[in-house]
Amino acid sequence: MPTPARLALVLAISALTSGCAEMPAAAAPPPPPGPILLTVDASDAPHALVHAHLTLPARPGEMTLAYPKWIPGTHGPTGQLVNLVDFHVSAGGKPIAWRRDSENLYEVTVTVPAGASAIDVDLDAFSPPSAVPDGALATQHVLALEWNRVVVYPKGGRVSALTVNARVRLPKGWSYATALTVAGEHDGSVEFRPVSLETLVDSPLIAGQYFKSFDVGVQHGAPHFVDVAADSPEGLAVPAEAVDSWRRLVAEANALFGARHYESYHFLVTASDHLWIGLEHHASSEEGMKERGLVDADLRRVNGDFMAHEYAHSWDGKYRRPRGLATPDYQEPMRGDLLWVYEGLTEYLGWVLASRSKAWTLDDARTFLAGAIVDLDKPGRQWRPVVDTAVAAQILWGAGGAGSSLRRSADYYYEGQLVWLEADVAIRQRTNGARSLDDFCQRFFGKADGPPEVRPYDLDEVTRTLDGVATNDWKGFFDARIYRIAPRVPLGGVEGAGYKVVYTDKKPEFLGLEEKAGKSSSYWESLGFYLNEENALGDVLAGSPASKAGLVAGMKVVAVDGRKYSSEVMKEALARAKTSTTPIALLTESNELYETHAVDWHGGERYRVLERDTSKPDLLEQILAPKVTK
């Protein structure tokens, strides 16, 4: 979830750079012993600021302070440095000058004066307005506090070895939830038991004026909760069927993996139109929903796999993590070559769990999978293998939609999903149904119940474990599908599961709900483009009728065949063109210029769907069937 630099904030953060000589930081000695004391004052969060005061053990001499840069789960240097403002360092009440490293902007060097055993750091985290929700911390009614945004730490050691004593002051009357253990509450502040910096950053906090917690069951001795902070009391009116689905999700996930690696689990949900969060943690997960995202049945249905995906990450990504992503601190670059396991397998398991918990119907799950196939069928796959989308994740996330069909996007998600479906089908076929990918999950992610820990892995361990479930040339299997250029979307799993990809002129219901929720319209399979909320082309498929007619991403569709654009007007134009040789006339506006484009398409509406191949067993139905009966 990379966040690009916000030019509007340059003046707001100029105090961090003006008048400070740039100078490379010296090699940092190990940090001095003793806990870091962190006090966060979030009482100003509704006004876009969170204040933090830190006391760090120190020794006289040069000391390098680091601000978290490479944030676990985001797969890139996404630390919100651009929103760090009003930064001051002092010792014994006297200011200390600081110098930014000219190569790693996330590090500053200070000189600790003689006789000092600690330094104090005061900083503010700015919360951008709702126009950039991925960088926002709070609204007037909701706070989503990620601790990495309000800490600096001494460079030179593992973050797992640094202890932090944290406390937070919340706006008056607000309630909160976090996976951290509370040590006490007094004078309007909450104090938490000491934890490592690694655990603190892995344990975000949400709070809100309108707040409700739902008990969703005990599994393997661990209690589970869905905690919701909403922008309105109406956003908390969660129906009983949603709570039942969450309980089924917890039960199905624990049955799938066979063990848990946390003492309790919190789904931390913010219900707001002005925040967006989606991030996994060991004992909690952050899910940013629309304000009515839990109340509206259609929105719940569209996002049916969101909580399942983030929850599955507690096992795949947090407990077991690719070695290149299991870095000792937040400054060392991460290597994402195995993100097709970290994210791709989780995308598959989230899809499975959403179906097994009945958040999705079988038809919903099939439509979602067909949509993934459509998304992956693009020119960029002719030159770029899946693994390169994983290695380049940090730049692809911020690339935007325009040109994504040419460059590829974070395809390790959806293509990983299809490849892992094929692996599941292969296991079932090779063992005559005796085993499945569930067996791999229990061997690789299960083991025994216990507290959070990180067990790094490499590709050899993945393939060895698979081979123990069902003998196969798994290295060759993944090499052909992940590491080599594959011009065609991998459909072996879909076809092996008893389905084939066909076209229909009737928009699937689930796709219609997705478009409604996203305020978008897709004509990708017919004309070759999709429109965003402003009726602007998000991307244009190379070689499509729209591309041949000269349409490019960014153009706004103003009119269709002489009538003001609407989805209904477009639908009517597509129907007319089926019985006519006259191209569809699209009037566009771009850079203050209006142009008419003759789009020569006469195939009507067209959507890819999965159709049963009755010559084969329906393995999809078996894979997605609930495993827990209650």
Image (cartoon, helix red, strand yellow):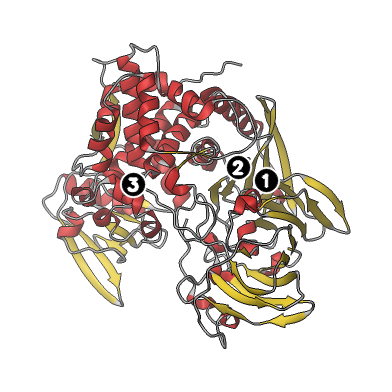
Based on the displayed image, in which of its 4 quarters is residue 159 positioned? Answer: bottom right
Neighbor class of circle 1 (other Cα within 10 Å; few <14, some 14-19, many 20+) is: many
**Relative height, residue 239 to residue 495 (above, below):** below
Real-space Cα separation, disc 2 to disc 1, in angstroms: 9 Å
Query: Would you name the residue on which mark 2 appears?
Result: 294
Badge 2 or badge 1: first in the primary sequence: 1
* Mark 2: secondary structure: loop
**Mark 3 belongs to which amino acid?**
Asp
Real-space Cα separation, disc 3 to disc 2, in angstroms: 28 Å
Farthest left residue in view: 581
Based on the displayed image, in which of its 4 quarters is residue 109 positioned? Answer: bottom right
**Mark 2 belongs to which amino acid?**
Leu
Q: Which mark is residue 296?
A: none
Q: Nearer the viewer, residue 179 or 196?
A: 196
Residue 6 rendering spot, x and y as whole percentages: 49, 72
> Is there a contact, CB below 8 Å, between mark 2 and mark 1?
yes
Query: Would you name the residue on which mark 1 appears?
Result: 228
**Relative height, residue 167 to residue 152 (above, below):** above
Q: Residue sitting at 52 percent across and 79 percent down?
A: 10
Badge 3 or badge 2: first in the primary sequence: 2
* Mark 1: secondary structure: strand
**Relative height, residue 284 to residue 618 (above, below):** below
Badge 1 or badge 3: first in the primary sequence: 1
Q: Residue sitting at 45 percent across and 29 percent down?
A: 352
Real-space Cα separation, disc 1 to disc 3, in angstroms: 31 Å
Residue 231 rendering spot, x and y as whole percentages: 67, 55
* Mark 3: secondary structure: loop
Say which of marks 2 and 1 sits in front. 1
621 on left or right of 553: right
Query: Would you name the residue on which mark 3 appears?
Result: 411
Which quadrant does the C terminus fall into?
A: top right
Say which of marks 1 and 3 sits in front. 3
